[in-house]
Amino acid sequence: MAMGKTPGSGDEGDEGVFAEINITPLTDIFLVLLIIFMVTSSVIVQQGPGGGAKAGLKVNLPKGGAADVTARTTDMSVAVLADGRFVLAGNVVSQEELQKAFDEAKVKDPDTVVIVQADEGVPHGTVVQVMELAKKAGLGQLAIGVREGE
């Protein structure tokens, strides 16, 4: 029986149908895919949290939740509107009035937590400005108010 011919074809000289499947190229492809998968998965693990990525700072983004910060009666909540105005206790205040309120809060309770609630459209610099005013007054405990995650 000739190799590559169908069994029982009878004619030794006829070109028969090739009945065997060569799986060597298929095995080679699977091995190459396995190597690619192993290399990429090790790169992803190294770039994950605590890994070796050096392309900037690692930042843990806060998750919005109702149980993150529980407001006390001594805490101050400052809202920053989309147009950059500051709201304290329901009243629109200027930057100087806000600084004065921070100074008074420091005198009453040095452990006052300042909760900054900024509109989504507020530039980052405005939020930092409010936080710097609080730190300048001596209030070091700052929090950022978020809405509950959806």
Image (tube, helix red, strand yellow):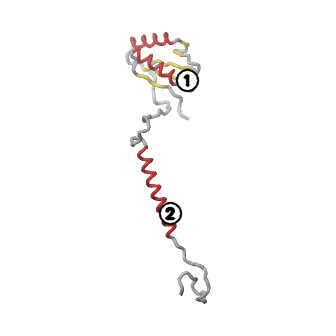
Residue at position x 45%, y 10% from top?
100
Q: What SS does tag 1 mark?
A: loop
Question: Residue 22, how many percent across, how many down?
Answer: 52, 73
Front tag of 1 and 2: 2
For label 2, the crowd category at 10 Å Cα-Cα, with few meaning under 14, some 14 to 19 and many 20 or more, is few
Q: What number of labels is visible?
A: 2
Per the model, the C-alpha gap separating discs 1 and 2 is: 53 Å
Residue drawn at x 48%, y 25% is: 144
The percent position of residue 70, horizontal first and vertical second, equals 45, 25
Q: Position of residue 91 (x, y in %)?
A: 55, 13
Residue 129 in the image, given as x and y percentages of width and height: 48, 19
The amino acid on which the numbered mark 2 sits, given as a three-letter code, is Ile
In the foreground, 7 or 118: 7
Residue at 43% of width from left, 43% of height from top? 48
Q: Amino acid at mark 1?
A: Val
Residue beneath disc 1: 122
Q: Which residue is mark 2?
A: 29
Asked if the residues shown at circle 1 and circle 2 are in contact, with their CB atoms under 8 angstroms apart, the answer is no
Taking the spot 45% from the left edge, 27% from the top edge, the residue there is: 69
Image: 141 above or below 27: above
Q: Earlier in the sequence, mark 1 or mark 2?
A: 2
Indicate left or right for 37 with 82 as reference. left
Q: Residue furthest front?
A: 13
- Quadrant of the drawing holding the C terminus: top right
Q: Splitting the image into 4 quarters, where does residue 140 fall?
A: top left
